[in-house]
Amino acid sequence: MKLEGQVALVTGASRGIGRAVAETMAAEGAAVAVNYRSGKEQADEVVAGITSAGGKAVAVPGDVSEYDQAVSMVEQTVSELGGLQMLVNNAGIAKDDLIYNMDPGMWLEVMRVNFGGTFNCTKAALSVFMRERAGSIVNMSSVMGERGWTGESNYSASKGAVNAFTRCCAVEFARFGIRVNAVLPGFAPTDMVAGLMEKDGGKGISKQIPQKRFGEVEEVAKTAVFLAGPDASHVTGALLTVDGGVSAQVGVGKPL
Amino acid sequence: MADVDSAVREAVVEALALDDDEVTPESTLMEDLGAESIDLLDILFRIEKGTGVKIEASDLGDYIQGGIPDDEFSDDNQIISAKGAEQLHKVMPQTDPSELEGKLNADEVMTLFTVQNLVDMVKGRADGAGG
């Protein structure tokens, strides 16, 4: 087990990719703080699943967009699990709309959670990491942070901010033994993209993906675990896409 | 507690990736040794680990200014006053107040701070915290 003896805080871990990250980390031996904002029952379920499989986990409430709550989350993790070595900034929201129709408050709301939450939890965890001169941060970004998509201007901009922040953190923290990387998923079946699946089971999307399929949340989670863990000891500032080739292709025209 | 002189020296050498003989008690951190703000932060965290004495980066400026309000420490153009120069001499005894008063910009006081000044600060904190 690669994460034996380590403690991880995973934000937004009650469902979707965050849940898969929490479960995969626990399966690799990490004790996991399962953060949630509103899904207490789901978070408890994740904790119960990890515990019954012989792992260690606690549910940690908190809204990542509020700095004070991020600090409490880190404090609770350290006091209940005995330390903190890994932070996965996963909590995120989407409020898709065309810019023409978008209420200006909608960009701020998305930015406050997706980028603000990443900033807040990173800063909150730094006091622990810098004192220990060790730590690993994985930011759950998106291929949308590097590419455009109609209706996702606010989400895309927030993930672009996360990518830029990831690079800056990597440079600023490297000397303190802290690594910072990002995972950029393409399309994975979570509640966030449920709307895309409604009409045709997602076929309209999946046929445009070079691998001709959506990603599994476990595939995203394993990449996050790789970046968080000791196998990536010289990897920092990396933005790793897990998208079946989506962002590698031009995407226009008909091939031979 | 570990010997403060050697703990501070080791922190400076390691944070700035210098050879041991490049660092003397008289070396100024920023001017002679080329430390930047992130280096100072690194040095303070290393000192905390080595000695148990916690100093925040913001404490450095406060320590140097000794609680004197900005408008008494320097004039409208940020130039150090007589009172400011006297305070600087207290925490940095190697400085000559007559050389600083009316000449030094308040933003530049940190450039005079030496390894020995940092050792003295850490020792003061350690005593204040009951050793």
Image (spheres, rainbow, N blue to C red):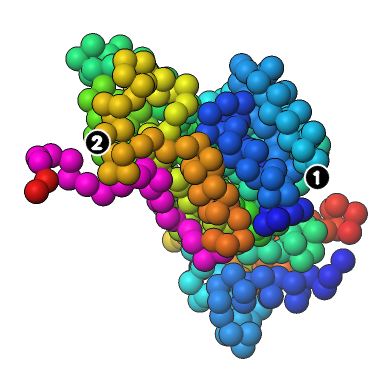
Residue at 75% x, 62% y: name it.
B49
The reply to whether the magenta stretch includes residue A251 is yes
Q: Are marks 2 and 1 on the same chain?
A: yes
Q: Main secondary structure of the magenta part?
A: loop
Residue at 67% x, 24% y: name it.
A43
The one nearer the camera, A160 or B118, is: A160
Image coordinates of residue B91 in percent, x first then y, are: 67, 61
* SS label for mark 1: loop
Residue matched to label 2 = A208
Specify the amino acid type for callout 2: Gln
User: Furthest residue to the front?
Assistant: A256
| Image height of A229 relative to A205, above or below | below
* SS label for mark 2: loop
Q: Chain of mark 2?
A: A
Specify the amino acid type for callout 1: Gly
Residues in magenta, as a range: A233-254
**Is residue A202 visible in the rendered structure shown here?**
yes
Image coordinates of residue A144 in percent, x first then y, are: 32, 36
The reply to whether the magenta stretch includes residue A60 is no
Q: Chain of mark 1?
A: A
The one nearer the camera, A137 or B107, is: A137
Residue at 72% x, 23% y: name it.
A44
Residue matched to label 1 = A82
Dividing the picture into quarters, in which one does residue A11 lie?
Answer: top right
